[in-house]
Amino acid sequence: MNWEAVIGVEIHLRLKTEHKLFCRDRAVFGAVPNTHVCPVCIGLPGALPVLNPHAVELALQTALAFGCSVHLESAWARKSYFYPDLPKGYQITQFEKPIATEGRVTFSSLEGEASVRIRRVHIEEDAGKLLHDKASGASAIDLNRAGTALVEIVTEPDLRMPEDVRSFLGELKQTVEYIGASDCNMEEGNLRVDANVSVRPVGSTELGNKTEIKNVNSFSGVEKALSIEIKRQISIIKDGGLVSQKTLLWDDHRSELREMRSKEESDDYRYFPEPDLYPLLLSQKQVVAALNSLPELPRDRRYRFKKTYKLKHYDAEVLTQTTANADYFEDLVEINVDPKVAAKWVTGPLQALMNQRGEDAQSIPVRPETMGELIGLVEVGVVSESAAKTVLVI
Ligand code: ADP
Ligand code: MG
């Protein structure tokens, strides 16, 4: 029998706001532990949350970038659980009424263009962080992260291959970076991915028992962890067993999955309406303004580059990797560098230079005007290509 995997992911993105979601503490990464905390984000009795409108704006843009239906009324809920990094004992999130539902992410899969449906997008606050390497035999707690603004994106179980999960995440990350809603840096925990996976016989439409993989810290880690878990599930079923629903933790050093806990159901969280916050109300005007404020998205820019500049798919893909690269390329074209020549220089020597210097197309000292002049000299044969590359490095 042939088996297929069924995969759905939950992505948490830290929104790029200066302040936390419900208080005026700054949301900063890497500060001295517990220096950005106040009664609100640690939930002292009597402290009241006040919603940060910038977080709503960024979440709204994210939802719209993926074509979601935005709800003019959404609501806040308390998700109760105990953990040392959550002194409040609950997390403020959106449960029954999220800000947006039903979107889509289109990406390049192994079999061509594919798309994954987004089930919901909601806003929530983050918890603090346990530090296991600060004190011997004990864990320390840093609450700087407590109360920072996150957006969670939950997909339908539409993915089938671990490789596709990686491309899908790449597309999602690129889009979010384009709109500037999050830095999407996995090392700093700005982007966290939990992957849910089950297997079933090819042709079946039923969903099997799933496991949830947490603690992955790179896209390649997600891909690897899923491949291992899919094999494990298939072998259990082939041996006549049943996959038990549980949460697994990815250990990147050992490349293995460890069991964390049996999965709790949403009932276990005792969700109830947050009494200290009004429902989140958006006006039609606000939604339209957010839609109009979206920049050209990666997919559209890629398509336009291929069409307008007659670039190969690969070049268009590389050039639109970041807004800065794409802008640099278009600046060159604007000063009359032939698009194909400009593409060659930006994806080749300039990219090499940026990698070498650890800079991007925005910060690199060689600006498009100078670059354009240099390319011009090469084109008319005054300077050889290799000499020009040497000049770039100096
Ligand atoms: P839970 O109640 O366990 O959190 P949800 O239905 O809320 O499960 O779904 C969480 C995520 O898991 C979603 O991304 C969804 O697409 C995915 N998912 C749900 N059921 C399955 C399944 N049987 N196999 C793979 N993924 C699944
Ligand atoms: Mg869930």
Image: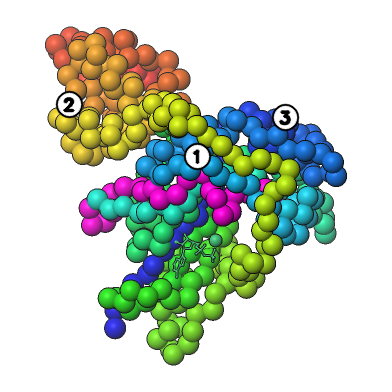
Q: CA distance from mark 2 to mark 3?
A: 46 Å
Q: Is residue 141 left or right of residue 210?
A: right
Q: CA distance from mark 1 to mark 3?
A: 25 Å
Q: Residue at x 27, y 76 (%)?
A: 203
Colouring chosen for the image of the structure: rainbow
Amino acid under disc 1: Leu
Badge 1 is on which residue?
72
Q: Residue furthest bottom?
A: 240
Amino acid under disc 2: Tyr
Q: Residues within 10 Å of mark 3 (few under 14, many from 20)?
A: some
- Is residue 108 within the magenta segment? yes
- Is residue 22 within the magenta segment? no
The image shows residue 279 at horizontal and vertical percentages of: 62, 42
Q: Is residue 355 among what the camera can see?
A: no
Q: Secondary structure at mark 3?
A: loop
Q: Residue at x 34, y 33 (%)?
A: 297
Q: Secondary structure at mark 2?
A: helix
Q: Where is ligand 2, by quadrant? A: bottom right
Closer to the camera in the image, 278 or 182: 278
Q: CA distance from mark 1 to mark 2?
A: 40 Å
Badge 2 is on which residue?
309
Tell me the magenta residue range: 91-112
Q: Is residue 149 among what the camera can see?
A: yes
The image shows residue 131 at horizontal and vertical percentages of: 74, 50
Q: Foreground mark, 1 or 2? A: 1
Badge 3 is on which residue?
24
- Image quadrant holding the N terminus, namely bottom left
Closer to the camera in the image, 22 or 164: 22
Q: Residue at x 39, y 26 (%)?
A: 292
